[in-house]
Image (cartoon, grey):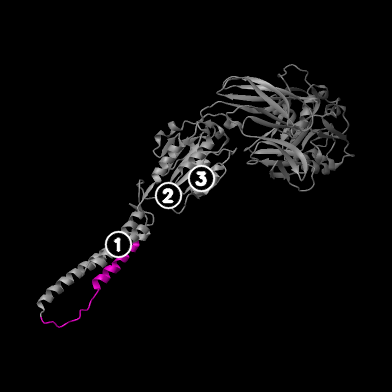
Amino acid sequence: MQFKNPEILYFLFLLIIPILIHLFQLQKFEKVAFTNVKLLKEIKQQTRKSSQLKKLLILLSRLLLFTSLIIAFAQPFFSKEKSHVKKDTFIYVDNSLSMQAKGENGELLQKVKTDLIKNLSNKKSNFTLITNNQIFNNVNIADVKNSIINIDYYPIKKELNTILLQIQSLQNKKIKNKNNILLISDFQNINTTLNAINFDSLTTYSLIQTIPNNLQNIVLDSVWIKDQNKDNIQIKAAIKSYQLAIENLSISLFINNKLFGKTTVNLEKNSQAEIEFSIPNTKNIKCKLSLNDNKLLFDNTLYFNIPNKEKIRVLAIGKNSGFLSRIYTRNDFDFIETSLDNLDYGSIIKQDLIILNELNNLPNSLSVTLKNYALNRGNIVVIPSLESDISTYNKLFTDLNLGKINSFKKEVKAVTTINYNHSFFKNVFQNQITNFQYPTVKTYFETDFKSATSLLQFEDKSDFISEIKLKNSKLYWIASSLKSSNSNFISSPLVVPVFYNFSIKNTIQKQLFYTIGQKNKILLKSNNQNNDAVHLVKNDTDFIPLQSKTANHLKIETDNYPLKDGLYQIKRKENIIQHIAYNYNREESDLAFYPIDKYIKNYNNIQYFTSLNQALKQLNDQNKNKNLWQLFIIFALLFLGLEIILQKFLKS
């Protein structure tokens, strides 16, 4: 027998008071003269014996009455749990998107919620309920019934280690209690690594794995631009199949909320297929791909946004050279060519690329401006002249901590090597070229740059064009003047891809969509001179993301928000800066589950269930107590009635 309030039992010591009163109770007898005392002596002896018996019986009934009352207030009970240590109960409910899958009685999450409400019947038994986005600490079923009903799917799935750390932080630090921890999840392979979890030997774990009846699923996985021109954009999308083969699966494309087209695809089991659409190249293209699949709903729609193409701003400082204007055409570039004397220093910070085209020297004011420009995500191309003042160039390179130019050399060299493995030349060449007409130079500069990587090399493996990474940008160094009298490089087929890539390799590459729950960095051009924050807006959703501003760029970072997929607007006040698309993570689309039952065989404190009802029944049985306080109240009433009977009917 155990007691909920064992401290009440200390009042049993007070029972000594009626015992002491009984022992020290004195009665004075009055003497009366009588002629024949022999009979009276016998009567007196009988009366004293009966009186003492009555008092003893009354004392005993009172002691039993008070004892029963004290024990009743201590609330005695019988428990199946042998240990007297209190156990706290923590219940984790996985409400991730994969719990949309259907079991025998509908969606897995809905069944879990129903079972919790039905089986946590003890309204006085407290527990802590944890989901991927909520915590209900030390509550009972009456407190959280409505909250359990309203548990919704959450797109960010937590690892089990994170959940157990949360539980550890919620435990009572003053009292080291043993715990019952119920983990209710489908335990997908993507986030279940039980080997890396340190299970507490003093804690009883119940792992309830909810597995759907059907592991088949079709998912719209990704979308990208295959090709585009001024009239059309070719987009491709990937569709994956898990455990399912299907023919003539229909996929619809919506543009600006209107059905644009449909196509069909055949999928083999556990395979991937691609579809293609050709759409007009217009502004503000907001798109949605969709298919019909009732297995999982969250991955049936894929939102994406094709951003408006912005002209790349290129500024060439130096003497006019016809080859640059032929490369940087008006259709794709906002190209300005100016002499050093006519340079507007204020326009430098607005450019995507600065080309120092054979300047004899770099004024200190230009070096300072270029340093600030490079630190604010600006790319620089340096083409030296035959008469370059090395010291002024080295001033800029020293300020940027790049290294230095060592000397000027007169020697004919051929450019023979292309670094095909460098990302600079990605998608430029279909095959590696082994026999092309090598461009040559008559003079060049020897350099000693830090962390420079080669793009093109001379025949002796020294650098002709090199890329030097800065913190937020790149500097491209060309080791020779490109004047026709010194080099034939501008007549080479290499000149166009090289100078074209100079301009696009650090421009803002806008993604078609971003993934909810991942760290996303969005870079925007911004000429806003005020410190007005931008908002992400969709219907009733409106929040301010983490953002930082440089001279002409705005960097936005999102992580745990937004929580709903769809097309959002990036707004400053009431002005729409850009549209942006968010989609749910596709990792949970693969309904592959961890074999929990095989893993836990070596653990005595971990139990595996496939039925939440069974796990909760066992928990309720462990916590079920047989209360006895009502019985002791009955005893108290019986002893009270016994005392009344003794007082009334037992004669002294």
Q: Residue at x 20, y 67 (%)?
A: 53
Hey, what amino acid is under mark 3?
Leu
Q: How far, Cα to Cα, is label 1 from label 2?
A: 44 Å
Let me know if residue 210 appears in the view.
yes
Identify the image quadrant of residue 620.
top left
| Residue 78 vertical placement versus 470 (above, below) | below
Nearer the N terminus, badge 1 or badge 3?
A: 3
Question: Which residue type does callout 1 highlight?
Answer: Gly
Work out how far the residue at label 1 is from the one at label 3, CA to CA, in angstroms.
48 Å
Asked if residue 102 is positioned above or below residue 398 in the image, the reply reads above
Question: First in sequence: mark 1 or mark 2?
Answer: 2
- Residue 229 in the image: state x and y as whole percent: 79, 25
Drawn side of residue 86 relative to residue 399, left or right: left
Bounds of the magenta segment: 10-35
Sequence-wise first label, 3 or 2: 3
Queried whether the magenta region covers residue 24, the answer comes back as yes
Tag 1 residue: 641
User: At which x and y percent is residue 288?
Assistant: 70, 30
Q: Nearer the viewer, residue 110 or 346?
A: 110
Circle 3 sits on which residue?
129
Front residue (pair 103, 599): 103
Which one is in front, 174 or 340?
174
Indicate the secondary structure of the residue bearing disc 3: strand
Choose top left, top right, bottom left or bottom right for residue 327.
Answer: top right
Frontmost of labels 1 and 2 is: 1
Determine whether, in the image, residue 54 is placed left or right of residue 392. left
Query: Residue 70 in the image: x percent, y percent?
Result: 34, 60
Q: Are marks 1 and 3 in contact (CB under 8 Å)?
A: no
Q: Which residue is pictured at 87% across the width and 38% down the height?
A: 340
Is residue 331 toward the left or the right of residue 555 in the image?
right
- Give the labeled residue for mark 2: 177
